[in-house]
Amino acid sequence: MPNAIRIYVKYVEIVNYRVGRFAMYLIFVLMGVLLYSSISKTFFMPSLWTLEVAQFTMVAYYILGGPYAMQLDDHVRMDLLYENWSPKTKAAVDAVTILFLLFYLGVLLHGGILSTEYAIKYGERSYSSWAPYMAPIKILMCFGILLMILQSVAVFFKDIAKVLEKEI
């Protein structure tokens, strides 16, 4: 494989590894928010912000952790036929199917960017009583989708290399 592809895969995987390791700890933030919510509802006045902060934290956990899960090959896969195939056949099928994923992620990113532009331009807020601005979470979602696209391209290159018997 060309050196540029090797460098691309190396750096995308470094970035996604670090972002994914950071995202792993968001589960503790989520647990803290939910614990605070439970305690405040039981003993004090219920907080207005806890539900949405928990939702935003879960979005960040999921969106930022996705590329890392893909990098580790820990994502969910239908193993009905796939498990019995050779590694080269798996890589060939993955190289084709990842093109559909890239199309989907491209459409998702396009919609996310348009939605983020709207949120920034008009100061979009949530319709809850707390009414936080929506732009920060939409920016984070676009960043996570972009990381997933970059990781998908890296996995595509690795699959092509495996089919050609030239490991990256």
Image: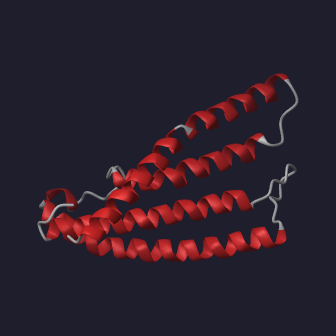
Is residue 70 visible in the rendered image? The answer is yes
How many numbered callouts?
0
Please give the name of the residue rendered at 83% of the width and 22% of the height, measured from the top-left corner: 43
Residue 3, x across and y down, in percent: 25, 68
Residue 162, x across and y down, in percent: 17, 65
Is 115 placed left or right of 91 in the picture?
right
Please give the name of the residue rendered at 51% of the width and 42% of the height, measured from the top-left corner: 22
Front in this rendered view, residue 74 or 20 = 20
Is 15 placed left or right of 26 in the picture?
left
Residue 76, x across and y down, in percent: 36, 54
Image quadrant occupied by the C terminus? bottom left
Please give the name of the residue rendered at 50% of the width and 75% of the height, measured from the top-left corner: 106
Identity of the residue furthest to the top in this view:
43
In the picture, residue 90 is in which quadrant? bottom left
Front in this rendered view, residue 106 or 16 = 16
Q: In the picture shown, does residue 63 fall above or below 166?
A: above
Q: In the picture shown, does residue 131 fall above or below 21?
A: below
Is 152 placed left or right of 131 in the picture?
left
Identity of the residue furthest to the front in this view:
3
Is residue 94 visible in the rendered image? The answer is no
Please give the name of the residue rendered at 48% of the width and 61% of the height, measured from the top-left corner: 147
